[in-house]
Amino acid sequence: MIDQKIIVKLQKLLALSASDNENEAALAMTKAEELMREHDLSVADVALDGSGAHVGSMEVEGLTKTSQTWEVFLGSMIADTFNGRAIRTRNSNGWGFTFVAGKTDLVIITDLFERLRSTIKRMSQAYVACAKDFTRTHSKSLHNSYRLGMIKTISQRFKHLKQNTAPTEGRNAFGITGTELMVIKDKAVDQRVNRLFPRVKTSATRASRVNGDAYQQGMTDGNNVSLHQSVETNGWPGQIAL
């Protein structure tokens, strides 16, 4: 039977190992490794409840007073691709997202969300500027349809990206598999979400009527959007800090 005091001590050390202070993080990890070897434990034995995973949150405001379907879809699928959560919230300016994810994943999620929604908005403006001379469809409907088409294609690309970067059963230097790492990270993210939003509910997004031509063009143009990160991180997708 493992002494619970040892588990608690190791969890605290693992949490410190995610510190932004490199010296503090390295010292904590060294002590944790020594203690785990002494008691024949792995990170999985200690941290499967989410302890030791450095999880953070970041708020990003929506572009408009009321949430737009395409923007909600975009934020949710990016967060899901990088093992995070996107919680829709209300604020003084209307609405926004609170993204919750591992330290590195959070940087990637917020960077991609802000960059991709800016790109989608810019491309839809260019499309509508040309298309409005050839159709009687209202510009707002054209924008919405085109953006939803882009989201459809981008979501498929993100799905493939997630499949291609699925965790493996290979063990890292701390004796933990990629699958176990993912379990730790997911539990830590869920814990953070539950602390921040104890009454969070899943809400359905309203279906939108679309213009077929604009939607199809958006789907086609969605293949031309770069999904590569524009920020420096230690991995793609980001790895849990342990």
Image: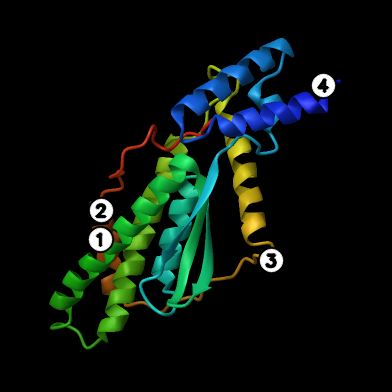
Asked if the residue under mark 4 is in contact with the one under mark 1, i.e. CB atoms within 8 Å, the reply is no
Task: Give residue 39's mark.
Answer: none
Three-letter code for the amino acid on which mark 1 is drawn: Thr
Three-letter code for the amino acid on which mark 2 is drawn: Val
Asked if the residue under mark 2 is in contact with the one under mark 1, i.e. CB atoms within 8 Å, the reply is yes
Image-based side of 83 in relation to 130, left or right: right
Q: Nearer the viewer, mark 3 or mark 2?
A: 3
For the C terminus, the quadrant is top right
Q: Position of residue 185 (x, y in %)?
A: 58, 39
Please report the residue visible at 45 percent of the width from the left and 28 percent of the height from the top.
Answer: 22
User: How far apart, in angstroms, are the residues tagged by discs 3 and 2?
Assistant: 36 Å
| Residue designated by label 1 | 119
Asked if the residue under mark 4 is in contact with the one under mark 2, i.e. CB atoms within 8 Å, the reply is no
| Residue designated by label 3 | 199
Asked if the residue under mark 2 is in contact with the one under mark 3, i.e. CB atoms within 8 Å, the reply is no
Three-letter code for the amino acid on which mark 3 is drawn: Arg
Q: Position of residue 43 (x, y in %)?
A: 64, 24
| Residue designated by label 4 | 2
Please report the residue visible at 46 percent of the width from the left and 36 percent of the height from the top.
Answer: 20
Please report the residue visible at 24 percent of the width from the left and 70 percent of the height from the top.
Answer: 124
Q: Nearer the viewer, mark 3 or mark 4?
A: 4
User: How far apart, in angstroms, are the residues tagged by discs 1 and 3?
Assistant: 33 Å
Question: Which quadrant of the view contains residue 217?
Answer: bottom left
| Residue designated by label 2 | 225
